[in-house]
Each structure stands twice: as structure tokens, then as C-alpha cells.
Amino acid sequence: MSGSDVKKPEKREEFVRMLMEAVRKEVEARSLLRGKPTKPTISGTAKILNIHRDTLYTWLREFDVDFKEASEKLSVTSLPEAAEVSRKYAYFIGEALVGEGNEVAHIDLLIGDKEGPVGEAFATGLSNLSMGHTPLLAVIRPNLPPKPHTLLVPKVTVKNLKDANKIFGPAQAAVAKAVADAVEEGIIPKDKVDDWVIVCSVFAHPQASDYRKIYHYNYSATKLALKRALAKYPPLEKVFYDKDRARHPIMGFRVPRLWRPPYLQIALDIPDLERTKRVIAQIPRSDRIILEVGTPLIKRYGTRVISELREVARDIFFVADLKTLDVGKVEVDLAYDETADAVVAAGLAPVETLNAFIYEAKKLGIYAVIDMLNVENHIKKLKMLKEFPDVIILHRGIDQETGRTLGLERIQELRQAFKDKRFLIAVAGGIVPETAKEALEKGANIIIVGRYVTQSRDIERAIRDFLELTPEMREDVDLFRVHVE
């Protein structure tokens, strides 16, 4: 800009007033985009004033105004926070995947006010072209764009005219028609069509060839994404409900979390990899089952055995029973690198080791488990820790199994002592169905079973002895998984 169409202020007071107003507008806009208060710039303020930055520099010198000093007078604390600024503008986000094969459509979109961040993204996208991802306006046919005006941005690099024709043809028409129909059907308010704009990111597979399907799927995906955006989909409850049930179609496997106890944890302690794989092959499918890669198995094969077992149990939650006593961070990393979902440290380890162990596990996003085998005062030891573990194991060792008393009273002791903490309690050591049922009734979340299952002649039957103990155990979570998209 030359600034020739902007009248130069005559007096210093007039210039300062004009400058401060421009600074305020720039800071509000930048704070909104960044999500936090931010400082003004010469270039940004000049843009608000509709003059070149060199012109602003000249005026600052002529009127003897220090830009930094002037902008600091507009205290950042006096400006609206980004969240407050955002209330001035509509800003909705939508996503949808529809179809199958190479013609599958995946739409990501923003819809909101021209004067807000969506409008700025629209203008920036339309005026900043990039090779292979050239944005274009959606049109129902040449010379007929829908309202709100919609900017279509290709996700996949357009390498040739064949690719371009898919975007400038069926995809462009589908997005435009979906927007127009969304207005007609009341999904988009009619009184907002001149105030709002849409930025729509479109996927077009290089090997897609059926124009009818490209149109068909992109139309449906765009309309669905608009509905979801304006309904503020998904509700948080749905995110929590589905996050541990969902299987991403391209990834091909689920990553379970311990979100709905009780669970049956099968301890794979046999130090024989092939025999362990045969045991896993006989385990019935159930979301209630998690697998423990036992200490003897890890000692023989190393933590790499976890990855090897993944080959035969892709969707199962794996616990690496390292019984860490030293170098807590290092051992967590070893298990994590082999895709363990949880790792176990010995409660007898020094507090410093346990603190490092728990910190590293939580940093990496896997479960920190503390095994209280031979720890005399569980509560005292746990109170010494900086962070609380995700799972506590009340454990009687194999060499100590002389009866069926498991110290189950400690379950409620732990609950009472740590009411403000969120954690699971597991019980282990010579567990049979009778003691397992008692433990569950007293509040255990995880039943850890070893030899009763792994040394059984009928492994599936042995497991079902536990899965049928209580109504909760019988309720296989997978039976309630409903695909609604």
C-alpha cells in the first residue's frame, strides 16, 4: 500500500489517538489468533491504518512519537483475553469422513465471521497460493458460488491436470452444493450468509477415478461436517465414551485403556515364548482381559518379547512386569519402546527411583504400576511419593502362598487413606475364582491370575471361570460398542 488514499493527521494528538486505536485493534486480532495476549507490531498497526509501514515510520518521526512507549500505554491487562475476544465472532469447526475406496471423502472445515479469525484465514488462504495446494472458491457451476462463500483447499498435493480436474470438478461442485443446501435446509442460518465464510479442506486420492462417487461422498461429508460444526459436535460425553472403544480404520487396531474395571490380568510367567503364544491363542476375546508380560519371560528374552507378543495380540493391553528396583526412568523407557501400555516397579524400590519411574511413565502416557510385594507399610510408602501411581498391586508372592488369606482388608485401607486420588487396585498371588470373587466384592479393580490359567489343560474354560464371577465381569464391554458414524 502506498498510503496515498489515507489522510495524514494534522496534529500530534490526532495521530496518537489514531495510532492507539489501530494498536488496540491489532492486539485484539493477534491475541485472538494466538489464544493469549500479545504485543503489537509496526507492520500490523500500519496494516490496520491502511498505510505502508514506511509511512508509519515517517509519521512517528514527524510527530515525535515512540511506538513502543505508546503501545505500552495500552496495557495488555486492559485488553480482552483471547477467550473474551472470541465471543465477538462465530468460530465453528467441523469434520466428517464418508464413503469408501479411493473415492472416500474426508472434510475438515471452519465456518465463522468474515471479521473474525475464520475470515482472516479465508482471506489469507485465497491470497497466498502454494504449489500443489492452490485454494479455490467453491462454485455450484462456473460463475455461481454458494453463500456463505467457501474456500476449498486441497489436502493432497495436486501434481497434474488429472488431479486438478477432481478438485476443480466434482469436489468443488459437491462442496458448493452442500453449502447451498445447508442454507436452504436451515443448517446454516440464512441471516448469516453474508456475514460468514467457510474454509473447507478436501481430500482427493490420487487414484480416485469415479467422478460420481467423488461428488457423492464429498457432498455428504461437507453437509455432515457443517451439521457437526454448528451443533458443536461431539459432546464431551461422547468423546469420553468412545475414546477407548474406537478403532481407527487406517491404523487397524485399538489402543485400550483401563477405563471401565473390573479386569482380569493374566500373568504370562512361563519363560518360553512359543508356549506363551499358544496360551494367548486360546484366550477368548474380551475387553475385560489384559495381559502381563511376566518377570521370568522378560528376564529370558528381554523387553523385546513385548513386541513379539504384539504380533499375536494386537488389541490387548500389555503390562510389563519389570519389578523395577533401580534406574526407574531407564526401565520405563525400555518397556515403552517395546509398546508396553503399563510398566511395574517394586514398591521396595527407593523413593527416588519410584518418583523417577512414575514421572517418566506419566510423561510418556503409559500406566505406572507399583507392586507392594513385601512392603510392610503400604500407606506410608505411598505418602512419600511426589506423584501417585495409576495402579497399586496388593501382592502375595508365590513362595508365600500357604493359604487363601490375601490381606484384602488393605483395599479399603488404601481407599480411605487416599480418597482424593484416582487409582486402581489389583490383587495377586495364588488367586482362584473363590478368592477373586471376594476381592471384587471388597473393591478390587484388577484380578491378577497366573498358574490357574497358564497351566490349565483348558485355558479358555479357566478364564471363563473368572469372567463369569460377577455381573460386571460377565458384561463384555465390546457387546456395547455401537458404530454410529
Image (cartoon, grey):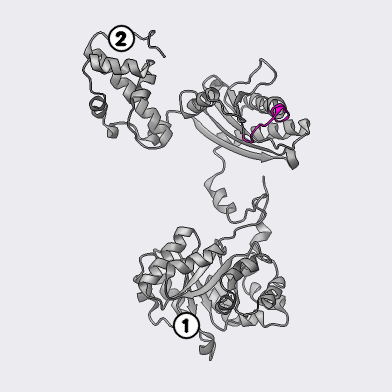
Q: Residue at x 35, y 28 (%)?
A: 27
Task: Tell me the magenta residue range.
Answer: 155-165
Foreground disc of the pair 2, 1: 2
Frontmost residue, 34 versus 4: 4
Q: Tell which of 232 and 305 is nearer to you.
A: 305
The residue that label 2 is drawn on is 8
Placement of 145 over or under 261, stated as above or below: above
Residue 287 picture location, percent across and down: 64, 64
Residue 411 seen in this snapshot: yes
Number of the label disc, if any, that sits on residue 280: none
Question: Which residue is at a point 48% across and 66% down the rendered structure image?
Answer: 332
Q: Quadrant of residue 283?
A: bottom right
Label 1: element kind? loop
Q: Is residue 163 magenta?
A: yes
Asked if residue 186 lies left or right of residue 161, the reply is: left
Which residue extends farthest bottom?
402
